[in-house]
Amino acid sequence: MAPGSALIPRHVDLTPGTEALRYCFALPAHPESVAGARRLTRARLDEWRLDADAHEAAVLVVSELVTNAVVHTASARVVCELHRLERRLRIAVQDQGHQPGGPKLRRTADDEHGRGLLLVDAMSSAWGSRDAGDGSGRIVWAELPHGTEQSC
């Protein structure tokens, strides 16, 4: 079996007949790149024909994870990977910086930052983070359930 990508390790069974799709893009770690990440995600999910709810949730999750990487790390670029398998969509965003202790949920309304992860937590079936290895940054990932749209 082939190894996983640099962002998403292989934890899935790819037996014959199982469809798996991956898409990866890198952008400069600038605030204006968040809109680019949303645009690239929308275009790919349109091609993959995800249902409307999962499509919009995924665009929001990508937006929040890329924003988090841009705002909270000293990265020159961020890399985003989308992985569609069966009824799940896994999103992973890797930065080059280091946010001490990793991303944190902030549950109080007066916090300046951190509420985006509350959205990720609410919209995802699972999410987490890990060191990318070899000191190259951090990967924050989220999984969303999805269906595919029916053709008329």
Image (cartoon, grey):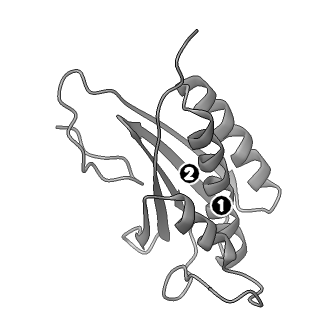
**Height in image: 43 above or below 75?**
above
Residues at discs 2 and 1 in contact (Cβ within 8 Å): yes
The amino acid type of the residue labelled 2 equals Cys
Query: Residue sitting at 43 percent across and 69 percent down?
Result: 128
Say if 33 sits above or below 103 in the image: above
Distance from label 2 to label 1 (Cα)? 8 Å
Quadrant in the picture for residue 74: bottom right
**Count of marks overlaid on the render:** 2
Which residue lies under the disc numbered 1? 66
Residue at position x 49%, y 28% from top? 148
Horizontally, is 35 left or right of 54 in the view? right
Q: Secondary structure at mark 2?
A: strand
> Which residue is denoted by mark 2 in the rendering?
80
Q: Nearer the viewer, residue 116 or 3?
A: 116
Q: Residue at x 31, y 53 (%)?
A: 9
Q: Residues within 10 Å of mark 1 (few under 14, many from 20)?
A: many
Left or right? Give the position of 139 relative to 41. left
> Which of the labelled discs sits on residue 47, or is there none?
none
User: Residue 31 appears at what percent x and percent y?
Assistant: 80, 62
Q: Is residue 81 above or below residue 140?
A: above
Residue 3 at x, y = what percent? 25, 45
